[in-house]
Amino acid sequence: MADLNPAKLTIDGQDYELPVLKPTAGPNVLDIRKLYGQADVFTYDPGFTSTASCDSTITYIDGDKGELWYRGYPIEQLAEKSHYLEVCYLLLHGELPSKEQMVDFENRITRHTMVHEQMHYFFRGFRRDSHPMATMVGVVGAMSAFYHDSTDISDEWQREVAAMRLIAKLPTIAAMAYKYSIGQPFVYPRNDLDYAANFLHMCFAVPAEDYVVKPELARAMDRIFTLHADHEQNASTSTVRLAGSSGANPFACIAAGIACLWGPAHGGANQACLEMLKEIGTVDRIPEYIAKAKDKNDPFRLMGFGHRVYKNFDPRAKVMKESADEVLDLLGIENNETLKVAKELERIALEDEYFVSKKLYPNVDFYSGIILSAMGFPTSMFTPIFAMSRTVGWISQWKEMIGDPQNKIGRPRQLYVGSDRRDYVDVSSR
Ligand code: SDX
């Protein structure tokens, strides 16, 4: 990182110089690592709206332009020209694979898709009506009890094996969570199917008859995986990094990421968004919900709208919107009332001063639920699909951090506004 002219800071008449770091792209960065030691002050940034927690080479977002790059490649090009496992290789290793590298990578992933047979019993400890995200948090965390031969984070080979196991097994675990929730038998992965087709087969096949995956649906599923693969230092990725900074094993770190993603302000928004669209029901009820979203006294927010970083269209939402039209057309679903409500809601919101002034646009979660619902998934499976897609991003960011010799435990400080020091008062005197 090239240094620029230092920033000058004066505190209580004392001048300090802070290095300014120049990134490949994006805002310059004020390096405050020595500030507390020099000036005995903390910086204060709840929600980290102005804070770079790390340096990274993986993903870049320009919120004003609505741009997203994986290792420098724009998401629109990857969604159109690449496929998810190639994107996994790119995120993990930093470059697009040669033909031979891709064949080897795909073979290794394909042969790690099965889970330890004992895991089937682990699922049985859950209630049938458990939310699949609850099951996934538990089962992924338990992977360290089954695959402890890839938990030594100081061993680069074990880090690589853990990454491959997670990318390969998350679809199997997500499909098992779904099957368990609907009382159907687990369907084993098949090595003759590609990654997305395999997932759809594990979700929708039943032993009683053959299930053939439509190639166009597998392609749409694969594209959804790519669009969700990584997204810089979002809440769940930051959770994975913070968990990993203590030296926790990779499976525990990914389970922490899944838990964080579940929140409706984050990955849980795709489920919340479709439930909101269905609650609105018809186009004529949209103004009522727009008013609720604008009402400061009403906690209601338009799910699938707004973003901490994007103050323009989320590029993923644009691709997802096009894909929604294709999938519904492919499935012969005409006049989908939910899609009509979504498109009209988007149109109205983008003309409304409140949303325009606050730069609130549809995000990745706005259209994804419409596609997943049309494919046959219940809303409870939307966030598990987000979680399995994001696993490669989480583990790539984790590997980047663990592989950095400068890596240290993340330990933020605080602005303490509690009681000043005081002595204990015996209960007889209270
Ligand atoms: C994801 O970080 C990532 O990269 C996440 C993600 C990824 O790939 O990892 O992109 C995935 O999480 C996408 C976001 C999914 N969440 C939702 O769709 C839930 C609905 N959106 C909001 O909750 C909200 O927009 C957030 C949480 C996404 C962003 O919140 P911020 O950045 O903290 O913004 P804010 O809450 O400070 O909002 C700024 C203003 C506020 O009004 P004022 O206090 O300034 O008057 O905009 C308003 C908010 O009230 N606002 C909304 C709104 N989102 C923000 N008002 C109505 N509806 C909304 N959706």
Image (cartoon, rainbow, N blue to C red):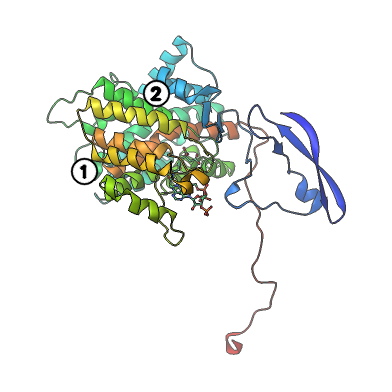
Residue bearing mark 1: 182
Given residues 20 and 158, the one toward you in this image is 20
Q: Residue at x 35, y 45 (%)?
A: 273
Relative vertical location of residue 199 with respect to residue 387 in this rendering, above or below: above
Q: Residue at x 45, y 36 (%)?
A: 148
Relative image position of residue 110 (x, y in whole percent): 36, 22
Q: Residue at x 41, y 47 (%)?
A: 262
User: In the picture, residue 63 is in which quadrant?
Assistant: top right
Relative image position of residue 404 (x, y in whole percent): 64, 32
Image quadrant holding the N terminus, namely top right
Residue bearing mark 2: 109
Few, some or many residues within 10 Å of mark 1 (<14, 14–19, 20+): few
Relative image position of residue 34 (x, y in whole percent): 77, 44
Residue 228 is at least partly visible in this image: no
Give, as a three-letter code, the residue at label 1.
Ile
Give, as a three-letter code, the residue at label 2.
Ile
Given residues 135 and 1, the one toward you in this image is 1
Q: Residue furthest top?
A: 99
Q: Residue furthest left?
A: 208
For label 1, the SS is loop
For label 2, the SS is helix
